[in-house]
Amino acid sequence: MNRYIFLTLAGACIAGSVFAQQKAKDVAAIKNLCGCHEVTFEYAETFPADSNYKPKGYHKTTDAVEYITVAEESASRIVLQHLLIAGEDVIKHWTEDWQYENRTLLAFDKDNRWKKIALPAEQVKGQWTQKVYGVDDEPRYEGSATWVHTDGRHYWEGSSDAPLPRREYTTRSDYNVLYRVNRHEITTTGWVHEQDNRKILRANGQDKVIVQEKGMNTYNRISESKCKEAKEWWERNKAFWALVRKEWEKVYNTNTVVVLQKKVNNEPLYKAMMELEKKALNKELAGAALEKEIAATLQQFTAANDLGLKR
């Protein structure tokens, strides 16, 4: 064999092995986010862009219990479902969909509007996209970055524009975009979700920064028995939410722009989905009929953009 060809093939094999090892570490880190956790949420506004603006004070929520489990998995995709335990109630929380070397992002623009963008293959080589969805698997934000494993640390840090967080979307109107830098890092006791955010008013093609914000969500593992109710809830409801994700994917795959309506017939999406979930659990709707109702509901709450782009 020609020496040049031999060295080229050997180099390709070594590179392939390195990527395989890296990917295996990535998968292990993502799955390490799972489990039963006691969570503390902390946020504080820091540096205002205008000296007349007074940053909002420190906010802390403690004693929340959250269960995270793998909802779906393939060679290049891991879907994690968060379930929040509030007293005797279990609340479906956010969903994170990790995709390997993904080339399509649904990027948040502003005012409940997202645009599909394409990423070059060389840019996402070895990267994972974290696609974050809300309580009804509606779009939130997406970012692509590389998991880092060095000096005993395991973390992923990505940035993206996002809608207002749930803690403020009903109380704030002075900004309409949250630029997020999210860092997820595995710790000896669980993991942390650290955020460096900028609150932005986007209008007429211009961005005006209002204030910066620091966030720190700390997930500490506790006994799995503390999440017994969440595990049982998920077993009862996971088939329904798998169908919801399936129908949402059809919306994402067939639209270049997604606009999410706040209400349809004076009803928010979460109420409409709660009603469908209840019917599915009570066996009032199943199979093709249930899929049809989910699809119809999502169609009602999504629309083409104001320029008349085709859905």
Image (cartoon, helix red, strand yellow):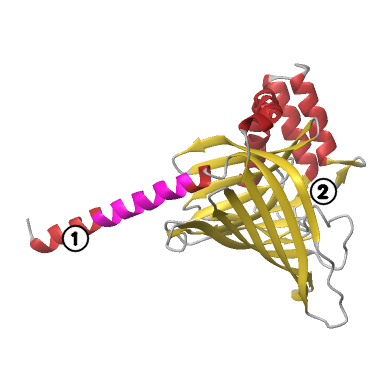
Main secondary structure along the magenta-highlighted residues: helix
User: Callout 1: 10 Å neighbours few (<14), some, many (20+)?
Assistant: few
| Picture disc at residue 87 | none
Amino acid under disc 1: Thr
Q: Residues within 10 Å of mark 2 (few under 14, many from 20)?
A: some
Residue 261's disc is 2
Judge whether residue 21 can be spotted in this image.
Answer: yes
Spot occupied by residue 244 in the image (x, y as percentages of width and height): 68, 34
Q: Where's residue 31, x and y in %?
A: 52, 42
Instruction: Decide which of tag 1 and tag 2 comes sooner along the chain.
Output: 1
Where disc 1 sits, the SS reads helix
Residue 303 vertical placement versus 51 (above, below):
above
Instruction: Quadrant for residue 193, please give it.
Output: bottom right
What segment carries the magenta color?
14-28
Q: Residue at x 74, y 58 (%)?
A: 42
Q: CA distance from mark 1 to mark 2?
A: 54 Å
The amino acid type found where label 2 is placed reads Gln
Q: Which residue is mark 1?
A: 8
Is 235 part of what is drawn in magenta? no
Residue at 57% from the left image edge and 45% from the top image edge: 33
